[in-house]
Every structure is written in C-alpha cells, then in structure tokens.
Image: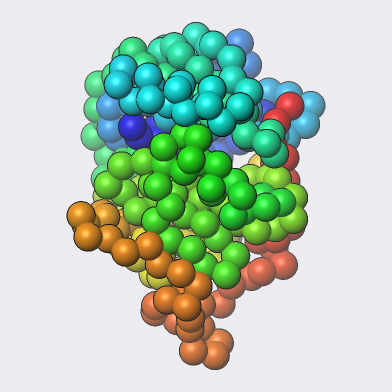
Amino acid sequence: MMLRSIELVLPDAAGAAGFLAGTWGMALAGEQHGTFYLRGSGRIPYLIALEDGAERFVRSTTFTCNDEELARLEERTVAAGLAWTATRSADPGGGERIVVELPEGEALRFLKGTAEAEPLLGRDLPVKLTHVVLNSAEAERSGRIMEAALGFNISDRTKAMVFLSCNRSHHSIAFTQAGFPSLNHIALEMEDIDAVMRGIGRMRDHSMSPAWGPGRHGPGANVFAYFVTPFGAVLEFSTALEELPDDHRVGGPEDWTWPPNRNDHWGLSNKDTARLSAAERSFRIGA
C-alpha cells in the first residue's frame, strides 16, 4: 500500500493551481471539469487535486493497494463497523474499490488498478506526496482505528501526535490532537536537502518566508520547511523521511523532548505557531 494523492475543494482552484505550478515547483498535469491536477517527477499521475467549490474542505486522501491488501482491508473495515462505499475514480490514473469514512468524517480512498504516467525531468519537482497530517478531536482514537480497522501501524507518538505507516516509510498519515477535525498540512517529498533549500529560496524570491524551518524532525527524522500558501493550506517541503527497520520500536512522548527554545534536532528556526494554527483550520474535513 502507498499514499498516492490528496483531493481538496476550494474557491479559485485555478489560482491555487497557478501558485503550485508557478511558485512552489509542481507541474500541472491537467484540468477536468474545474478540477486541476498537480504532479511531481514520478510515475504518479497527480499528487494534489484542486476542485473549484464555494468552501474549503478535504474531499479525500487516496492510497493505492494490491488485491491482497484490499481484501484484508475490506474484511477489517466490515468487522470494525466503519462506513464505506464502492467507488470508481474519475481522476487521472483511474482505479476502483472503496472509500472508507472514519468517525470524524475523514474520507480515505483505497484504489486498485490505477494507471501510471511517464516520469518528468526536473530537479525541483517533488518526487511524491510523502505524508498528510490531519487535525483530530481525538488523535489517539483515530490512530487506533487506523491500526485496528485499516491495517496501518502506529510508528510513533508525541504529546500531541500519532504517526501511522502503511509500508516502510515512517509515516504516510498522522493525526494531531487539536480538538477538531481539519487539514493540518501536506508534505511533498523532494529529491534531497538541496532541493528543499532551493524551494525555500524560491519562496523567498516571492516574498514568502517559512512558517517553520528549515529543520529536522524527531519522529521520522525528515528535513522540513513549512509554508502557509496563498490559498490557505500549509505545505511542507520534506526529504529523507526515515525507512522503518525490521526491529523498529514505537516511540512515545518521552522519546521526543527538546531543550528550552528548541523544537527539532537542529534548532535553526522559530515556529510561527499563530500563523500555522490559523491556517490549519482553513480546510475542514468532509463536504
């Protein structure tokens, strides 16, 4: 199983797509009936979909699976009593199977039979969508449901977050204890640290400074830089996310403590908590 894409609804989808393709560094994969698709350098047809709508919300987060994974997923979902519907994707790459709705309204698509695209050249294109973080009214409950009902594995915990993996990557999705469900941020994997730093430079060329970063996280150990986009979402340049070893031990809050005035391994930057917190309320969960 792997994380493929996230689908958002928002006013002025064309303007948001223009920012992602013109400033952030993604490539426009196409437009269908008012939905714009942005991609990276790999074979995934798109990483972010932007659908024109009156309000901002997360339509779905999409994973791709094989037949065996889907069979286990469907059995677990039924046993857990989670709501799900059959679906056939009309987005680039197609695919079909199910959409599972979590208790707080998060729609997770699990697809098989998806098509690939020809890779693109470009050292500043993102490689893939590396993870999605969602705010939650009950992050621990959401994490446990993902583990018990959907077959994900909890890989780490902090005081406020639960991280979940669906393959060797440290996390593909995570939940933050916020008291409400919404989109926290979207993380795009870059080729290397230089690509992250060039991305920061590109944002500065457009008078945009990081809301947090550059830095290196504790859980996952990835390099990061967060920006609040003009269309409201928080996006992260990321690279070098940890691959889980066979003997991985699930971390807890006691493993991730920092000295005063530091909140990551490097301690190079301050975190603009007020700006991030406001933006993290921008995209609610569900229609």
Which residue is pictured at 50% across the width and 73% down the height?
253
Q: Position of residue 228 (x, y in %)?
A: 61, 54
- Judge from the rendering whether residue 150 lies leftward or rightward of residue 137; answer left or right: left
Q: Is residue 17 above or below residue 160?
A: above
- Judge from the rendering whether residue 97 lies leftward or rightward of residue 167; answer left or right: right
- Judge from the rendering whether residue 32 lies leftward or rightward of residue 120; answer left or right: right
Q: How many marks?
A: 0
Residue 165 appears in view = yes
Quadrant of residue 26 in the image?
A: top left
Which residue is pictured at 48% across the width and 83% down the height?
258
Q: Is residue 112 above or below residue 284?
A: above
Which residue is pictured at 48% across the width and 63% down the height?
157
Q: Is residue 168 above or below residue 77?
A: below
Which residue is pictured at 39% across the width and 79% down the height?
266
Q: Is residue 173 above or below residue 76?
A: below
Q: Position of residue 32 (x, y in %)?
A: 55, 12
Q: Position of residue 136 (x, y in %)?
A: 66, 50
